[in-house]
Amino acid sequence: MEALQKLLGNLEISILEYIGLGIVAFMTLLVIFIRKNLTEYLFFNIWKKIKKKFRKSRYDKQEVDKDTKIREILIELRTLTHSQRSSVFQFHNGNVFTSKNPIWKISNTHESVAAGTSTEIGALQDIKASAIIDLVSCFWDNKPKSGVYQISPEFCDDNCPHKKESPHDKKVFFYSVAELEEGYSKTLLMQQGIHYILLSPLCDRDSHYIGFIWVNYCEENKNIEKIKKRSSILCRHSSHISFALVNS
């Protein structure tokens, strides 16, 4: 009897030892599994964050390079046209600059001004396209509008990059603010002290309009014929800015 009890006692101890060893082994494997997966998880997420930061940094650099390039073009444009202000406007649908969705709004995205000329970029954001449709409708139709004149290719000289194209499809318009029909557009321009404008549409690779550039003349007594003869400069610089916007 005592021998049987002793045997059962030893057996119980052995079972407990095996259970203990099993628990230890299980916990060891669990720790290894957790450490392995935790390491992979941490590595994956750290690498993911590094890649994201790198991409964002590269994107930000591209954006900075694009904006710098456009500002340089606008400064050159304003200087060559002897104007007081040069600006880029882009069409958008509320949050995305696009030519493929309905054009609901127009925003001034870049600007260069001469000394003593007011900056207007802050006041020209999210303008409803319908409010200034009389300024941009000439892009799509050839109906004559008071104060709006297409001056290309008639006033383009031999320096125009589109001069030899047939047909010359780059449009440049001359606006006489005093001659515009009464309305929001005319009031807006007069508030900015603008008397004359040279304007050219911006296009993407598919020739869809994505916005426009303009130069402003804020002095009334200007030689209008001389201003119109700067049409070639608008042709050239609008092509440069279109390229910068599309290829950024």
Image (cartoon, grey):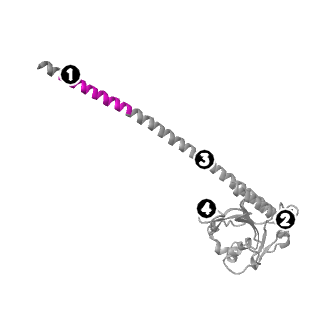
Counting residues from the start of the chain, the first of labels 2 and 4 encountered is: 4
Q: Residue furthest left?
A: 1
Where disc 3 sits, the SS reads helix
Residue 96, disc: 4
Which kind of residue does numbered mark 1 sit on? Asn
Q: Are marks 2 and 4 in contact (CB under 8 Å)?
A: no
Counting residues from the start of the chain, the first of labels 2 and 3 encountered is: 3
Report the residue marked by disc 3. Answer: 55
Query: Measured from the top left, where is residue 152 in percent x and y?
Result: 82, 69
| Residue 20 sits inside the magenta stretch | yes
Select label 2 or label 3 by which is in front: 2
Question: Compared to 74, does 220 lie above or below?
Answer: below
| Residue 237 sits inside the magenta stretch | no
Where disc 4 sits, the SS reads loop
Q: Which residue shows up at 37% across the image and 30% down it? A: 28
Left of 241 or right of it: where is 56? Answer: left
Report the residue marked by disc 1. Answer: 10
Query: Measured from the top left, where is residue 226 in percent x and y?
Result: 85, 69
Query: Measured from the top left, where is residue 239 in percent x and y?
Result: 77, 60
Report the residue marked by disc 2. Answer: 166
**Based on the displayed image, in which of its 4 quarters is residue 11 positioned?**
top left
Given residues 189 and 106, the one toward you in this image is: 106
